[in-house]
Amino acid sequence: MHTADTPSKAVSSARMPTWFIPHGGGPCFFMNWKPADAWHKMAHFLKSAAATLPHRPKAIVLVSAHWLESSFTVTSGHNPALIFDYSGFPQHTYELKYAAPGEPELATRITHLLGQAQLSSQENLTRGFDHGMFIPMMLMFPDVEIPVVQLSLAKSLDPEAHLQAGKALESLRDEGVLIVGSGMSFHNMRGYGDPRFGPISDEFDGWLMHAVEMPSPMRHPALVDWAQAPSARLCHPPRAEEHLLPLMVVAGAAGEDMGRRVFSDRVMETTLSAFSFG
């Protein structure tokens, strides 16, 4: 059984780290679950994360597994609405509120940086925040005062492109911007709740931790070839790896900084982890 690791110490530099966090299952933190404590350790980790930062973020760029576009797209509205992109949950979970302000100027800056890296991108004035954003953010930054820009994945699902997108945004970290990838280190819907997937998820999670902890020149090619890792496609089936790709963006934004696993727990018979760089 995995347990939550001790939260990482505050970063010594003023430079922001980059994070890959698990966002759980739908609105899992705000409803009854069986067993009742299934998501408690993950919730505690998310609630504790902000205390490890060197200072309060000026803004947050959040990459959600639940938004794919033909090219990288950023929310550019002043006050994005919430998108309740889950189904079959209690009615009160469709009444959750998280009125974080947008940051149009940051959205434009992001498209400019991506363009400089020869990556196609666009702004979306009307797109709201999906649950890959607002569910974990309600725990991490409950005061709802920090501006947030959400960045989509690219439908190509190309890991190299997502690493390069992160690299293009690395300089934002020196401007007080926190870059967060919101997904799941294991995401095979048929595997959740199946004890046979425990060892399978352990094997891939062990490889992923080792890859993240590699020096950048080795980490980058390892993550590009993630599908060749042990049990990789049992944990993220073909053309359904969108929950892993936010990790590529934050790893790219890490630059030369080292990465580490900062949380791991067994939930629904599978291992789920979080990673931090910098």
Image (cartoon, rainbow, N blue to C red):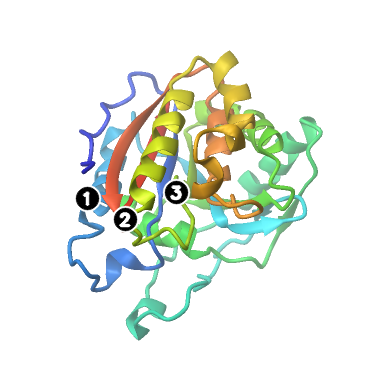
Residue 90 drawn above or below residue 129:
below
Q: Position of residue 153 (x, y in %)?
A: 65, 50
Q: CA distance from mark 3 to mark 1?
A: 17 Å
Q: Amino acid at mark 1?
A: Lys
Does 55 appear above or below 196? above
Q: Residue at x 38, y 19 (%)?
A: 13
* Residue 163 in picture, x, y percent from top left: 64, 32
Query: Which label number is shown at residue 244?
Result: none
Whether residues under marks 2 and 1 lie with C-beta atoms below 8 angstroms apart, the answer is no
Ranked by sequence position, the earlier of labels 3 and 2 is 3
Asked if the residue at tag 2 contacts the one at tag 3, i.e. Cβ–Cβ closer than 8 Å, the answer is no
Residue 121 appears anywhere in the view: yes
Residue 33 versus residue 20: which sits nearer the camera? 33
Quadrant of the drawing holding the C terminus: top left
Location of mark 2 (residue)? 195
Mark 2 or 1: in front is: 2
